[in-house]
Amino acid sequence: MSLIFSTEEGWIISHLQYLNDIYKTVKNGNTQCSLIFNETLFEINSQYLRQNQVTQCDQHEGIPLQHKSRKRKRTKLLPEEDLKEINYVKQAFNQIISSAKAGGLFSSNVMSDNNEAARLASQTFYQDTFSGEEEYFYGCNDMDVAIISEAKDKKYVFPNKCSFYCYDVRDVARKLELNNQYDFILLDPPWWNKSIRRKKTRYLEASYKMMYNEELARIPIGKLLCSNGLVAIWCTNAPSHLHSIFHNIFPSWGITYRAKWYWIKVTQEGGTTCNFNLALGKQPYELLVLGSVLNGNEINIPDGKLLISVPSAVHSHKPPLTEVLQEYLPNEPKCLEIFARYLLPKWTSWGLEVLKFQHLSLYTVIEETKEAQNSNNMDVNKLIS
């Protein structure tokens, strides 16, 4: 559903296509409909520029690039090992994109406006769904079809066979059975960083609670994961976080490192959303670090794979991993996501904003014509405690 291109180096994923596919059939009361995700949020038509950069580009339009930028102090390059890694990612990325464009993927006639529509849609979404109050609840959709229902006086879409917990991660041991039940656990931690700390002061709607690495290490992953289980954790490029995963978090969980993959964020034209940086600074990719249970059966996971996709403009809306990981998991895996902000079919999701991206305002309801076969409508509110 989500894979639109595949090579030995990695995959190109359509997050938008995946969302539209899983909600092709949705029960809405006594009617049947389908949902279309707000595609404006994926209208990433250029690299992201700060407002002062946009102004400079407008003022100097037509002037050769080397005369546009001010002289900067000479910056220190990253360590040689990091430069080799960046060079590998860049070369693999160029190979995949070149093949994809030859096959007709990506548009060559995109109007560049610094992603203005996507930025505005993201800001509107956060403002419309912001709640300063913390609410704790759990629920599920036991049906074989996705449904639209109310929860906490708001309308959401719930994928089939999902369950969810809106609690602090420190409550995992009290709410979930610690009986090594999950084949796959995905985490998208709220890493402590200065950017989010600044955002809290000026853009509260898009901020979230951050956690120290020592707190992440105390999550009982080892008691939730089965003996042949796989763990994947999204990580920024901050060396301190990676060091903590390898030397603190994974060992505390009883997990051994297996592979590191790279999520490359691209525009609709196939270019990166920012340049590859040879000095300390922002990169056009995030990391997915994979591990498995210590002394468990060996899982042969290739290292250095690339996941390429046009990102959603809403923060932390990660691309789906269901299809790229299916060959490393059982046929019907039990999957858990911690720090989730959305729900997935047949998954258990845990997070303080677990219904964030299920809000019906993100979707357009269409084809509401067929009467649902089963008028036995499930009310999610009845299952929320």
Image (cartoon, helix red, strand yellow):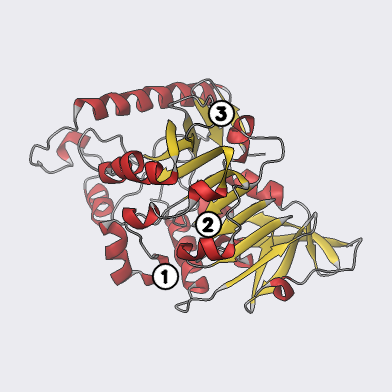
Earlier residue among tags 3 and 1: 1
Residue position marked by numbered label 3 in the rendering: 297
| Residue at (54% x, 46% y) in the render | 185
| Alpha-carbon span between mark 3 and mark 2 | 28 Å
Contact (CB < 8 A) between labels 3 and 2?
A: no
Label placed on residue 340: 2
| Residue at (75% x, 59% y) in the render | 366
Earlier residue among tags 2 and 1: 1
Q: Could you tell whether 228 is left or right of 364 in the image? A: left
Q: Residue 261: in sight, yes or no?
A: no
Observer-nearest residue: 230 or 234?
A: 230
Amino acid at circle 3: Asn
Image vertical order of residue 55 relative to residue 45, above or below: below
Q: Residues within 10 Å of mark 3 (few under 14, many from 20)?
A: few
- Expressed as whole percent of the image width and height from the top left, the position of residue 83 reads 25, 27
- What count of labels does the image hold? 3
Earlier residue among tags 3 and 2: 3
Label placed on residue 205: 1
Numbered disc 2: secondary structure? loop
| Residue at (28% x, 23% y) in the render | 84
Numbered disc 3: secondary structure? loop
Image vertical order of residue 153 relative to residue 110, above or below: below
- Expressed as whole percent of the image width and height from the top left, the position of residue 173 reads 52, 61
Image vertical order of residue 235 relative to residue 206, above or below: above
Amino acid at circle 1: Glu
Q: Residue furthest right?
A: 373
Q: Residues within 10 Å of mark 1 (few under 14, many from 20)?
A: some
The quarter in which the C terminus is drawn is: bottom right
